[in-house]
Each structure stands twice: as structure tokens, then as C-alpha cells.
Image (cartoon, rainbow, N blue to C red):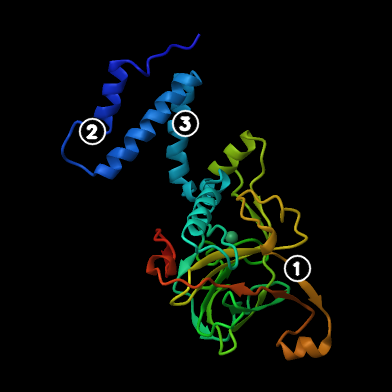
Amino acid sequence: MTVKTMQTEAVQNLLLKAAGLDKADGNPRLKQIMHRFLSDIYQMIEDLDITPEEFWKGACYINELGSNNESVLIAPGLGFDHYLDIRADAKDKLEGLDGGTPRTIEGPLYVEGAPLSVGEAKMVDGKTPGQGMLLHGKVVDEEGNPIAGAVVDIWHADSKGGYSYFDPSQSAFNLRRRIETDENGNYTARSIVPSGYGCPPGGSTIKVLEGLGRHGNRPAHIHYFVSKASYKHLTTQINLSGDKYTYDDFAFATKDELVIDARPIADKTLIKENGFEDNYFDVEFNICLVKTDKSAAQDMHPRERASQ
Ligand code: FE
């Protein structure tokens, strides 16, 4: 039998006091969010008859999650990043800002301030092993006109699934570059094919996912920020086709329009022309930006990000 206490004066007063709503001081927005948050949790405890043992297990789990720096990892795993994207898409539609290349989640591994070059860049430091990848494309507007001077900020994992900065074995900004599109709107990066990766084994995120009967793997993917004044900022990523997890990403980032083939190139002339020593993969990702005069839409949303 579940006891019902939520609607009693004692519990409703407790919620008001716990959220500081009986005090003049403090931040009104925080009070509003906290009151709703606590009300929903209390209600869940009542509805699901959460035991003290389950409650304290959850509280200790939050401690562990934070000490492992995994709150930004479990967030996409539980669909929060994708849910925020769904809301942003709906807001864009309402404001007439939909269209162009679809957005998808940023993930937690961006580092600000990657080297900037015009037209092309070599992303790999020469010490990182991997199969060569020519990553290129054109940035255009909705009428198909090339956009020169757009900044294409690209970051991806190495062939073991590790990211520079977070993986101390890699050099600074390895596999991270910003490329300004040339006068024809083109960008070209010489890099290596990234590998997918999983949540850290034995970590806090995988523990929960396994409890839910889920895995914690991502397919091979490449992250993008694309920006240019007078255009809506784009946060997106491409998933390489043919990966076991292309359509089964634990972070829910896959979109059909963002699944791209990596075409194997064995032509000796092309290999030489494009500066590779051996067979490589060609990955073409063309990007369409949406025009806007709303300055907030031209910037990426503020969030704590690593910088170097
Ligand atoms: Fe990633």
C-alpha cells in the first residue's frame, strides 16, 4: 500500500521552504526551478513508493557521477542532449529559422581555440596512427550560393576512440582544427578515419546503461560547428556509414541526412595529388546554413567548454 502525503499542508509547506519561496533573498529563477524539481521528485517518491534504500543509493550515485566527471556523459545517454535539440528544432520552426543542414548534439569533448587556417588544414600530428581521410565539402546558403569565410570547426577521435586534451597521450589540438571556407565556400581537411568509442568501462554512466539493458557505444563520427555572421550557428556531426552503431548510437545523435559514406580511394594519382602515402578514405560533407539577422541565433549556446 502506498501512503499519500503529497497534498498535505506539511509537505506543501516543506516544498515552499526548501525552495526558499518563503524568503525575499535569493534568485527567483532558481527558486522556481528548485520548487518544481523537488515537487516532481517528491511526487515520484510517493507514486513509485521509493524506499529509503533506493533514495540513498541515488544520492550516493550522484556523488560518484560527479567525482568521475561523467554528468556530461550520462546526459546524452539519457537523451537530454537530443531532447534539447528537438526543442531547438521546434523553436526554429516557430521562428522561421528551420531548414539547412540538421543540427545534432555537441557532446562533452569540444575544446575551444583550435588552430585556424583558410581553405584547408592538416588535422593529424603525424605521430597518430590511422587510415588517411580526406574530409571536404562546400558551405552554401539555402539558394545554393557558396559561403566564403565561414568557420568550419571540426573535432574527432583518433583510431582508438580518444580525443586530444582528454587523452593525454595525444598532442595539443590533435584532430581539432578550424578551417575558414575559401572564396568558393570549400573546406578540406587531411586527417585519419576516427573510430567510435564507448563510455569508460566500470564508470558511472555504463553502470546505469547496463542496468537499463542498454549499451554505451557511439559509432565513428566527426563533430562540426559551422558559423558565419548573418547565418544561424550550426552544431552538428556526421556518422560514418557501415559502423555497427551508426543507427544505434547511445547518445541518440544519428540523423539520416548526417550519415555519410567513407569511400575507399586506391587511385595512385589521387593518393599523390591529395598528399597521402597510401590508400585513403574520401568523406564529403556539404553544409547548408540558414540566413538570420537574429544575433543570438548566430552564436553557439553558452556552456562551460574546455579551452587550451
Ligand atoms: Fe564525439
> Mark 1 or 2 closer to N-term?
2
Quadrant where the C terminus is found in the figure? bottom left
Q: Quickly name the residue at label 3.
A: 58
- The mark found on residue 17 in the picture is none
Q: Which residue is depicted at the point 75% across and 62% down?
A: 241
Structural distance between the alpha carbons of marks 1 and 2 = 55 Å
> Mark 3 or 2 closer to N-term?
2
Between 167 and 190, the one lying in front of the other is: 190
Q: Are marks 1 and 2 in contact (CB under 8 Å)?
A: no
Q: Quickly name the residue at label 2.
A: 21
Q: Secondary structure at mark 3?
A: helix
User: Disc 2 residue type?
Assistant: Leu
The picture places residue 98, in percent across and down from the top left corner, at 54, 62
Q: Can residue 50 be seen at all in this image of the molecule?
A: no
Q: Quickly name the residue at label 1.
A: 261
Q: Secondary structure at mark 2?
A: loop
Structural distance between the alpha carbons of marks 3 and 2 = 26 Å
Q: Which residue is depicted at the point 64% across and 61% down?
A: 161
Between 106 and 156, the one lying in front of the other is: 106
